[in-house]
Amino acid sequence: MLIGQKIDFSYKGLEYTGTYISSNENTITVKLESGYNITMNRKAITIRREYKIEENTIQKSVSENGGCGDRGICILTTGGTIGSSVDYKTGAVKPVKDISYLYNYVPNISQFKLYHENIDNILSENVNAEKWIKFARKARDAMKNENSVIIFHGTDTMQYSASALSFMFEEQTRPIIFTGSQRSSDRPSSDAFLNIEGSIHFASMDFGEVGIAMHSGTSDDSVSLHRATRTRKMHTSRRDAFLSIDESIMALYTHGSVNKKAKMEKESDNIVLKDRLDTNIGLIYFYPGMREEDFYNLSYNKKGVIILGTGLGHTSAEIIDVIRKLSKETAFFMTSQCIFGNVNMNVYSTGRELMKAGAIPLGNMLAETAMVKAMYLSANYPDNFVELMQKNLRGELEDVLKSTTPGSHREPVP
């Protein structure tokens, strides 16, 4: 049998269908249709049928200089758990360069024209602005050849990367879908294969935005497509860790088909990429008793600072004094440590004092999204930086999306 081959078998008097993963002299491991792995004594099972494995249609980079082919789906791998395996000597998960075995597990893959290029091999905690620019340029090159783009990425910082590309691409001709997995492909109940399957189907839509495709629930039955700028990882290990905050998902993949759930931007006729980012932006989580000098040191000489304030957008009086001192040179923007709801700095005197000092409320914009948005605007639109931070550009302000006058999620920058 080959890795990824579908089999029917009997075990302890029951009939099963699954996918062959591995075996040794005494045991055999099969992934059941439920998504869970089962390891059995070889002598205790009877294999009743071996299905013909689909021909692997994934193509490697088509030139020595890298890049994908044309008019298909370009899968760019950057590392992360979805492109990792377990080192069983240490128990650690390590990135691997060759992930071609993943594609044997995705059903009906032969109907798609797929390419694969490995552009990095990095765990997501090591991703930075330089990497975001690299990912964006690779995605642009793929779209120039009329490809949709899927980016395999570690889940821990995927919301940052997806948001960064969402802002950098002011117009895009094809979908860009980020996906990952909470559990590596060789672990029991890996979510990698269904996430890949859903991403391929989402990438086949008329969809001109950046999205994140991850499990909808703990079972292997559906994948949700989230808008990049409204998404957050909400759990360290659950397969359904990602959630659209204060809005519905854009689409759902289940039972082989895609159901659209919300408005999404259509593909553009042009590619407009602004691939500059200002790394002189800070992100500060306020906490009770935070020292004035600590906040000052983290803020000093920054072009912009995103504050995660308490509740409706508050800090202590000492922090207000620092904002007042630095606000002539540094733009301070207020988000909330609360996941849901809006910043409202007019309710309490603390909020009003913060605004007088120079803090600018950002509604219900997610702090991570606000940070990468500030990096994009400071680098490309410095004269309109503060004004544009308060404007909905990529659906990052959910209350704007609920306006009674439908408009584009991709607003032009003046």
Image (tube, grey):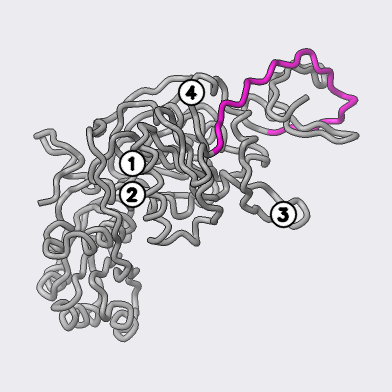
Mark identifier at residue 91: 3
State the image quarter where residue 289 is shown: bottom left
**Alpha-carbon span between mark 3 and mark 2:** 33 Å
Farthest residue, direction bottom: 293
Rendered location of residue 298, percent (x, y):
33, 78
**Alpha-carbon span between mark 3 and mark 4:** 35 Å
**In the structure shown, which secondary structural element does the residue marked by tag 4 occupy?**
loop
Label 3 amino acid? Gly
Residue under circle 2? 165
Label 4 amino acid? Phe
Q: Which mark is first along the chain, 1 or 2? A: 2
Label 2 amino acid? Leu
Residue under circle 4? 112
Q: Is residue 296 magenta?
A: no
Instruction: Determine crowd level at label 2: few under 14, some 14-19, many 20+ residues with C-alpha closer than 10 A.
Output: many
Q: Which mark is first along the chain, 4 or 3? A: 3
Q: Which mark is first along the chain, 1 or 3? A: 3
- The stretch of residues the image draws in magenta is 37-60
Circle 3 or circle 4, nearest the eye: 4
In-front residue for pair 362/132: 132
Residue under circle 1? 210
In-front residue for pair 10/314: 10
**In the structure shown, which secondary structural element does the residue marked by tag 1 occupy?**
strand
**Alpha-carbon span between mark 3 and mark 1:** 34 Å
| CB atoms of marks 2 and 1 within 8 Å | yes
Q: Is residue 363 left or right of residue 277?
A: left
Rendered location of residue 26, percent (x, y):
89, 34
Q: Is residue 42 magenta?
A: yes
